[in-house]
Image (cartoon, helix red, strand yellow):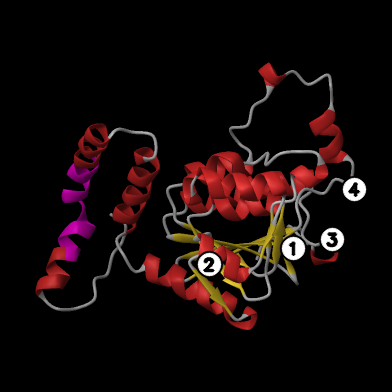
Amino acid sequence: MSEQQDVLFSVDNHVATITLNRPDRQNTISGPMLASLSEYLLQGDRDPDVRAIVITGAGKFFCAGLDLRSGGIASGLSNQRTSPANLDLRNTPPTVLHNLDTPTICALNGSAAGYGMDLALGCDIRLMADTAKLAAAFTKRGVLPESGGTWILPRLIGWSKASEIIFTGRTLGPQDCLDYGLVSRVVNSNELPAAAAALGREIAANAPLAVQGSKRMMRMGMNETFNDHVHHVFLQLLPLFQSEDFKEGMKSFMEKRDPEFKGL
């Protein structure tokens, strides 16, 4: 386990778990936590032993947003001397999360508001505790979804539904999230950690290069024409055909056994 107290990182059975660990502050994210979150996301993505990443929170909340009470983030966001031309967002968690090839699972153990909601939406898969909520409270605070929500939400549920949620600052319960298709599954809060770990292991059991390539193509496909996309898919397939995992996949199928993939 990492010595970093506010963000924890561990790996078990090819699944990395990143835990926001400020339960006394509803897991609001401070400036140092932003740096740690990006660091651990990249660490998991670079580690060949990690085949899935779970993001969750400690205690009753997933993440209540940015920690504006500490002053660090608030002053940074409102600093008039900061020129938009000088902003570098390449290593911020939303950008890092979006560009990871390793599949990400958000285990929504509790309510997610503001930045926490954007963080959850940025993951590939969301599992939700039956006690959790998603709160799009941005416009109620005089701001907008600053960490990817305006890009992600319309693509997940369509323009009209996304507009209704963002413009009203609505809070969504588990059934709302299921109805909108924002989460894959709602589970008992006590069962959420095991469910997320099991899903991570199920992903990890498959050929990691193929899983990562599939995610990469899905991400590219969001901004490509169909003809361009199928061309890129074919180019992605060529190195996979040369991989040891492809040979193992075919061999295990013929031998009617579970494959043992090594990511090679």
Asked if residue 160 lies left or right of residue 67, the reply is left
User: Of circles 2 and 4, which is in front?
Assistant: 2
Q: Is residue 246 magenta?
A: yes
Q: Which residue is mark 4?
A: 69
Q: Which residue is mark 1?
A: 21
Q: Earlier in the sequence, mark 1 or mark 2?
A: 1
Q: Which residue is mark 3?
A: 25
State the separation of the CA atoms marked 2 and 3.
Answer: 28 Å
Residue most toward the left? 254
Main SS class of the magenta portion in the image: helix
Q: Which residues are magenta?
A: 236-249
Task: Report the disc number at residue 178.
Answer: 2
State the separation of the CA atoms marked 1 and 3.
Answer: 9 Å
State the separation of the CA atoms marked 3 and 4.
Answer: 10 Å
Q: Is residue 234 magenta?
A: no
Where is residue 232? Give x, y as percent. 25, 36
Mark 3: which amino acid?
Arg
Residue drawn 65% across the image and 67% down it? 173
User: Of circles 1 and 2, which is in front?
Assistant: 2
Mark 1: which amino acid?
Asn
The secondary element bearing badge 3 is classed as helix
Q: Earlier in the sequence, mark 3 or mark 4?
A: 3
Residue drawn 60% across the image and 81% down it? 188
User: Of circles 2 and 3, which is in front?
Assistant: 2
Where is residue 149? Give x, y as percent. 60, 44
Asked if residue 251 lies left or right of residue 172, the reply is left
State the separation of the CA atoms marked 1 and 2.
Answer: 27 Å
The answer to the question of whether label 2 and label 4 lie on touching residues, with beta carbons closer than 8 A, is no
Residue drawn 13% across the image and 68% down it? 251
Can residue 232 be seen here? The reply is yes
The secondary element bearing badge 4 is classed as loop
Q: Closest to the observer: 19 or 43? A: 19
